[in-house]
Structures are given as structure tokens and as C-alpha cells.
Amino acid sequence: MKDSKILLLGGTGLLGQSLQTEFKNSAFKNVYTCSREALESAQHIQGDLLDVALVQQLIDFKFDLIINLTGQITKPIENCLLLNSVGIEHLIQIVQQSPNCKLMQISTVGVYGTCSFADENSKLNPETPYSVAKCKAEKLLKNQLASANVVIFRLSNLYGEAQLKGIFAYLNRAASTDRVLDFNNDGSLVRFFIHVNDCAAVLVAFIQNHLQKESGVYNIIGPDKYSVLELIQLFEEIKNLKFKINLDIAPPYDNALNLSDTKIRSLFDYSPKMNIKSYFNTMNSYD
């Protein structure tokens, strides 16, 4: 696998950057990135998956593996929706016309919706525009590509030092300014967290040892589970500060209380190096 030609589609984002580092550390040499950014690198392709001109260009590269990191949540949501529909149709064309190409689709555990427990065989019940879009992308890929050519990874929430959005960035900004937090739910929203570097290590280990034989859907679940209020409380304790918290009376969406990752752990076990407590300790101090 280390000689394979690999494309990180949307590879300059949070997970893409960690994957680039993990591939380099694991002696993969033919790893390309593709994004709308213009970068001075012989192994970077500038393009937009929504642009039909990119389709033939990527077909001509004859990639052995494409990891689709596009279609993450954006504001406004329109670009996310387009990348998980039109973009996926373009990606299907690329894979179908690229001999021996396999696809790894990065999805989300949000597709399970609100439930007491979910594993890879659970019914999908997405409740937000983002999770609906990811669910649609999964269905398109399953319906139009051979099952042996697709692996779908449903990730729990990622966090890391380069993250510019999400609850950790929000806590950091609020702690540095007015220390006021506003949420559109009642605070009972539960999320599982895995550091982006730990997630990248799991994905590369899968590619090295299992990609050629395995397909289907796998959950990757982090070691930490917190409700919104529990996470805020932990942050306050570690940083010795207090927020003013404004909650809504509405219950949260996509609130899965327990998630299983036993399927991928049946292939290999993984022990994340980072947890949220240690991560919070690395963040800024606030006067």
C-alpha cells in the first residue's frame, strides 16, 4: 500500500492536514491533496469537486485510493449540501473510470440521529441538514459503486489545535472575551470526541493493514463522552473561570447517547494518545 497513489480530496482541512502528517510518518510517498486552495506543491491539485473540469483531471491521475474529506458542515449550508449530492455524483464518475480505485468516504455518526444506542447496523435517522446531507452521500455511493470499492467511516466529533470552529473554538473565544455562551438546545446534547491526530492514525492503520480486504461501514468513536454542560463544567474547572450560559428549552438533535466501535476494533485495537482533559490543559490560560 505504501507505493499506492492516494488522493486526499479536501485534504487541506483539519483532518486532511493530520492525514498528510500521518502518511509522511508512515513512509507513504505518493500522497496528493486536492482543494480549492492554490498551493505551491507538485502533489497538490487545485480544483473544486463541483466543477466538471476537475472530474477528467482526476480520472487521468489513476489514483489507487481516494479519501473524500469534502462536504463538511459550512455556513451557509448550501455548499455542504451540493458537495454531498452533485459532488458525490462527480466522485462516483471518477472512481468508476479509475481502474482499481477504492474510495474512503468520511461521514458522521450524526446519521444515526437521536437514539439510546447505535452501531453500524442501526437504522439511519438524521435530524439536521448536515447529517441528512451525509446520509444522502452514503446512499448515493452504496447504490452506484460496487460494495467492494467503498469504505465509509462514520466519525465522532473531531478536535485539534488547528480547529477554527466547533465547541472547543467557541469555548476558547468566549473565555478570551465576554465569557458568555449561547446554545440552541437545553444543554443535554451528548457528543463523543476523538483528537484529529488519533483519528488520522486509525485511518492510516486501516489503510496499511486492512483496506485491500475490507469494505462496508465503520464507526470511529473517541474515548471521551460529554454533554454540552459537562464539557463546559470541565473547561471551567481546568481553566478556573466561569461562563454565563444561555440555554434554549429545545431538546438537541442527532443526540446518540451510546455508540459502538467494536466492528473496527475487531480488526485492530487503537488507543488514542489525547483526551479532552489533557487537551484543555494545553490551551491558553485566561486572566
Image: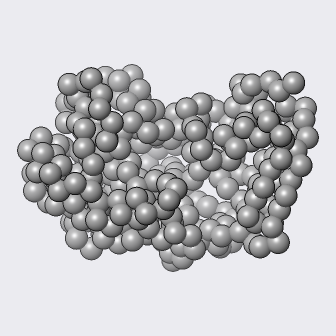
- Image height of 193 relative to 52, above or below: above
Q: Count every numbered label the image shows and give the total.
A: 0
Is residue 114 left or right of 214 when viewed as pictured? right
- Image height of 136 relative to 202, above or below: below
Color encoding of the figure: one colour
Determine which quarter of the picture holds residue 23: top left
Determine which quarter of the picture holds residue 273: top right
x and y percentages locating residue 58 in the rendered image: 16, 46
Q: Nearer the viewer, residue 200 or 252?
A: 252
Q: Residue at x 56, y 70 (%)?
A: 128
- Whether residue 110 is visible here, answered yes or no, is yes
x and y percentages locating residue 202 in the rendered image: 46, 40
Q: Residue at x 62, y 47 (%)?
A: 166
Q: Residue at x 14, y 51 (%)?
A: 53
Where, quadrant-wise, is the C terminus in this rendering?
A: top right
Q: Nearer the viewer, residue 129 or 109?
A: 129
Where, quadrant-wise, is the N terminus in this rendering?
A: top left
Q: Residue at x 43, y 48 (%)?
A: 267
Is residue 148 left or right of 280 when viewed as pictured? left
- Image height of 22 relative to 124, above or below: above
Q: Nearer the viewer, residue 184 or 114?
A: 184
Is residue 187 left or right of 213 when viewed as pictured? right
Q: Nearer the viewer, residue 61 or 174?
A: 174
x and y percentages locating residue 70 in the rendered image: 38, 51
- Whether residue 119 is visible here, answered yes or no, is no
